Image: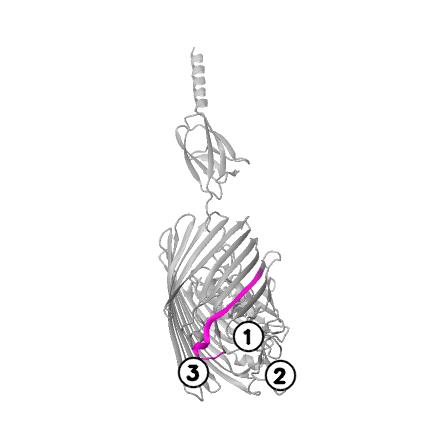
Amino acid sequence: MKTQIFVILALMVAASMVNAQTIISGVVTDQKGETLPGANIYLKDTFDGTNSKADGTFSFETEETGNQILVISFIGFKTLERPVDLSASALEVNISLKEEINKVDGVTIAAGAFEASDVKKVTVLKPLDIVTTASAAGDIMGAINTLPGTATVGESGRLFVRGGEGYETKVFIDGMEARNAFGATAPNVPTRGRFSPFLFKGTIFSTGGYSAEYGQALSSALVLNSNDIAAETQGDVSLMSVGGDAAYTKRWEKTSLSGKIQHTDLRPYQDLVKQAFDWEKAPVSTVGEIVFRQKVKSNGWLKVYANADQSNFIIRQPNINRGGLKDTINLSNDYFYLNATYKDILSSKLSIRGGVSTTSNAENIIFNRDKVNGKEVGAHFKLGLNWDASERVVVNFGTEYFHKKFERAIDPASEAAVQFDFTDNITSSFVEADYFASNKFILRAGLRFENSSLLNQSWASPRLAASYKVGEKGQFSFAYGSFLQAPQNQYALVNTDLKPEEATHYILNYQYIHDGRVFRIEGYQKDYKNLVKFSSPNDFNPLNYNNAGFGQAKGVDIFWRDSKTVKNTDYWVSYSYVDSERNYQDFSISGTPSFLSSHNFSWVIKHFVQPLRTQFGATYNYASTRPFHNPNLPGFQNDGTPAFHDLSLNAAILFKQNIILYLSSSNVLGRDNVFGYQYANSPNAQGVFERQAVRQAAKRFIFVGLFITLTKNGQENQLRNL
């Protein structure tokens, strides 16, 4: 009897357990109805669950009862928690998951922009590339000139982008304007950028269609992002064939302070290497820099950077109109730049940034016996906010104030002195929103407002960009924008009623990135209007200046970079084609500007040889013929220069652990590159306009440097910089 009772009770318990089991089944899809295989489905705080099958279906049993929470998760989608009632023996649940927007690794706006920094997943041109590019000789602008969209203008040294002149590119440091970013120079003598590449951790080089945050640039914005707190306390000494410098950095827990003094004197070098230019006094300059970095609380950064630069030279240049006599140009330049910025995270959805930059650039020129003195003083104030309005919308907005005062005094030896000046205050505001429709599609819309006190007028400039991701490796991007820039100082000085010049950009881009390889192809169209026109250069009649100029530029840029195929080797290739015509300045009809070459090609390679502890580099630059006006031939812009070729080599040798020997040479083959011709104003007795060629300063430039780093352990060096 007892045995029977026990059996009955056991059967009752077993039956109860069977009845308590619930089968949960269903299917997991995305919002478009596509099934999601491999999704994780389970009851919260239990071990009961399963994964969806290839067709998105799932089924599992549980002994849990009552009200429970069913959790469904899948990579790339929002985790969903759904309340369920397990009172029945079977429960069918169909799940639709929403895509999770990834603002870091998802699609990004790529049209027109080459971006590189330590915090970005995608890098195209890193800071290290700037100082290891053979043709750049440590110049930021020289390295940028190996990217597509730029043109080789050897007699200038500035950045000419997509059919635009050098003045159409603006430089920003930590978002703040850096006026007069290139060193002072004479006509047809190339210059360099003023700022050391060692200061920056990242660059954004935009060849068009850039953010509404950046204004007063018709063609391009180069944004340099400075380093944070220095890694450690150290000293650096550099001995170079053109001068030397000494730097010291002190690092505390949340603060670093750096100072540097650099002196450059080309006289000893030019005494050894024959120059095509006639220097009475070779360029001499002294630069001092101070960099302060402070971490404020947990997320705030205060950065202060100051640069003071004094330079001078005397050069004699042949004048085709003076029967073989030369003009003497005596130039001295005093430059000062101060940049102070602060950024912080105010909350999980709001961050703030702001700053001020000031520039003073005084240039005194004695041209033969005539004196020309000019001074530009500028200031830039900015306050910007980034707001994560929702999961899908990010808003960038802010306000800016630009102040500029320019004055020029002309004191001819045989006439009365005259003086011109003007002041312009530009008030700007910008708003820009990124809408993340999905991890494959992003839309950016922006608007920039500007008001000029000089003209008492306002303008609105719309910006629009979009990107669509094709798979995990490629994406298409489009950008459109209207861009304004105040007339150059020498024009606004004469006629203060000139309106800003304007360019409209249309860009279509495809970019592929995978395993250390980058491919980009980009087509563009630029339409110019309100360009400044005048009757003749150096005309001081304001009635002869107007905004009747116009033009266009269109073309395609191609870029390929590969750091994986060959061990210890990194190389990139860029090609640009541009077709451009303008009717501006003193052009009588539309024509291709003299600075423009239709085809530009660059090839850069770097290879590290471990046994020799040496990095070797080479750069080859090519530019097709450039047009110019030959008065001996019919037509306008009717002749062309020879093509430009330059092969440069360099090597960085780790001589000791803290000592590097650096060698470089431009144009190693010694090609005689010609950048254009200057013609006489009147024909000779045979009716021919005589000419003289505009050439480079020397067949090649050779640089030798010894870089020594001093730290406690003696193991640090500047190889990361060289």
Q: Is residue 142 left or right of residue 685?
A: left
Residue 544 falls within the magenta-colored stretch: yes
- Please tell me which of labels 2 and 1 falls first in the chain: 1
Residue type highlighted by circle 3 = Ile
Write down the residue under mark 2.
688
Q: Is residue 51 above or below residue 10?
A: below
Point out which mark residue 256 bears.
none
Q: Is residue 428 above or below residue 56?
A: below
User: Which image quadrant is residue 571 in?
Assistant: bottom right
Instruction: State which mark lies toward you, 2 or 3.
Output: 2
Instruction: State which mark lies toward you, 1 or 3.
Output: 3
Point out which mark residue 155 bears.
1
Number of marks: 3
Tell me the residue at 54%/56% (across/down).
509
Write down the residue under mark 3.
410
Tell me the residue at 38%/51% (across/down).
349
Q: Is residue 312 above or below residue 120?
A: below
Residue type highlighted by circle 2 = Val
- 654 or 76: nearer the eye? 76
Residue 411 spot, x, y in % from top left: 42, 85
**Quarter of the image where the N terminus is located:** top left
Residue 20 spot, x, y in % from top left: 43, 24
Q: Which residues are magenta?
A: 536-558
How far apart in space, not on screen, are marks 1 and 3 (Cα)? 26 Å
Q: Regarding mark 1 in the picture, which secondary structure is present there?
A: loop
Q: Regarding mark 2 in the picture, which secondary structure is present there?
A: loop
